[in-house]
């Protein structure tokens, strides 16, 4: 199985600060079609996860442009340019290259 | 609007089975696969398996092979996940999610809490 490792575990921020979350996979997620099979999800308190980024860097519908994804192969980063109160929750990366689909352990973003 | 609505919370005894439903609306059910993901308390999200809503073909995580059965009823636009031989470690929130062509879950159900306790 592909192991997904996220850091940091927790990210306390003040509103307006930037946020950066990293995700590393145990094997390359670069498909031979040129896409990285890596998605980012946000689980807000008490809610189901919601899709933020797919194919490593493509924003899902309705996701603000202050949220961005980058990286390729085994190393990926999710960035929020200016954190707002609505960004609070747990962020997960997930590899979609092969089954079993696997998730990172999560990064909890909270507002100080 | 496009949504997945799951059945309500369940409490089961060890050794029993549970069947959770996922009712799709707002889109053509047979055009998308439906996956099941669970989240045990304090644990990361865990993929269980999926069903091709058109063909009924399934694939399961080896971890749950033999205990999980995912089915669908295309006439009612419902997907089901049945987990048998329940143990306390199966206590979790179970989610269904729609699989989009861009290889990601774009719609999630609200989750179903399953508690396994004697």
Image (cartoon, grey):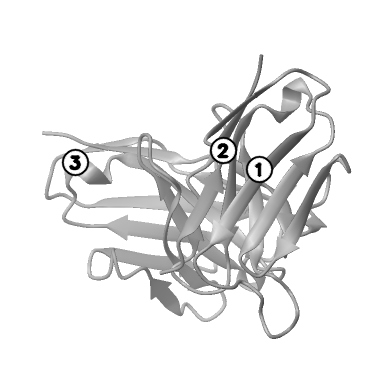
Q: Tell me residue B9's x, y (percent).
A: 37, 35
Q: Is residue B38 visible?
A: yes
Residue reaching furthest to the bottom:
A32
Q: Residue at x 89, y 43 (%)?
A: A65
**Distance between the alpha carbons at the discs numbered 3 and 1:** 33 Å
Above-or-below relation of B49 to B109: below
Give the mark nearer the N terminus: 2 vs 1. 2
Which circle marks residue B88 in the picture? 3
Which circle marks residue A8 in the picture? 2
Which of labels 3 and 2 is toward the front?
2
**Distance between the alpha carbons at the discs numbered 2 and 1:** 7 Å
Decide which of B112, B61 is in the foreground and name it: B61
Q: Residue at x 38, y 41 (%)?
A: B43
Question: Left or right of B55: which side holds B102?
Answer: right
Q: Tell me residue B55's x, y (percent).
A: 52, 81
Quickly name the residue at label 1. Answer: A21
Q: Tell me residue A108's x, y (percent).
A: 57, 31
Decide which of A79, B102 is in the foreground and name it: A79
| Residue contact at pointers 2 and 1, CB within 8 angstroms | yes
Question: Left or right of A100: which side holds A54?
Answer: right
Above-or-below relation of B90 to A70: above
Q: Is residue B105 visible?
A: no
Q: Residue at x 30, y 63 (%)?
A: B68
- Chain bearing tag 3 is B
**Distance between the alpha carbons at the discs numbered 3 and 2:** 30 Å
Secondary structure found at label 1: strand
Q: Tell me residue A75's x, y (percent).
A: 64, 60
Secondary structure found at label 3: helix
Residue A90, quarter of the rendered image: top right
Which circle marks residue A35 in the picture? none
Label 2 crowd bin: few (<14), some (14–19), many (20+), radius 10 Å: some
Which of labels 3 and 1 is toward the front?
1
């Amino acid at each position: 199985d592909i192991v997904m490792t996220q850091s940091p575990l927790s990210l306390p921020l003040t509103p307006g600060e930037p946020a950066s979350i990293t995700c590393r996979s145990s094997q390359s997620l670069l498909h031979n079609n040129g896409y990285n099979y890596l998605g980012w999800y946000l689980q807000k308190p008490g809610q189901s996860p919601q899709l933020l980024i797919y194919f490593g860097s493509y924003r899902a519908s309705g996701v603000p442009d202050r949220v961005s994804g980058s990286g390729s192969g085994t190393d990926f980063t999710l960035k929020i340019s200016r954190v707002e109160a609505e960004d609070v929750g747990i962020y997960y990366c997930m590899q979609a290259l092969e089954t079993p689909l696997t998730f990172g352990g999560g990064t909890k973003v909270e507002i100080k | 609007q496009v949504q997945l609505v799951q059945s309500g919370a369940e409490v089961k005894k060890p050794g029993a089975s549970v069947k959770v439903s996922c009712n799709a609306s707002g889109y053509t059910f047979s055009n998308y696969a439906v996956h099941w993901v669970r989240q045990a308390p304090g644990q990361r999200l865990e993929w269980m398996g999926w069903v091709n809503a058109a063909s009924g073909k399934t694939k399961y995580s080896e971890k749950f092979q033999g205990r999980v059965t995912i089915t669908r009823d295309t006439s009612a636009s419902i997907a089901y996940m049945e987990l048998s031989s329940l143990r306390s470690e199966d206590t979790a929130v179970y989610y269904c999610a729609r699989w989009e062509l861009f290889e990601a879950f774009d719609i999630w159900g609200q989750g179903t809490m399953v508690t396994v306790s004697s």
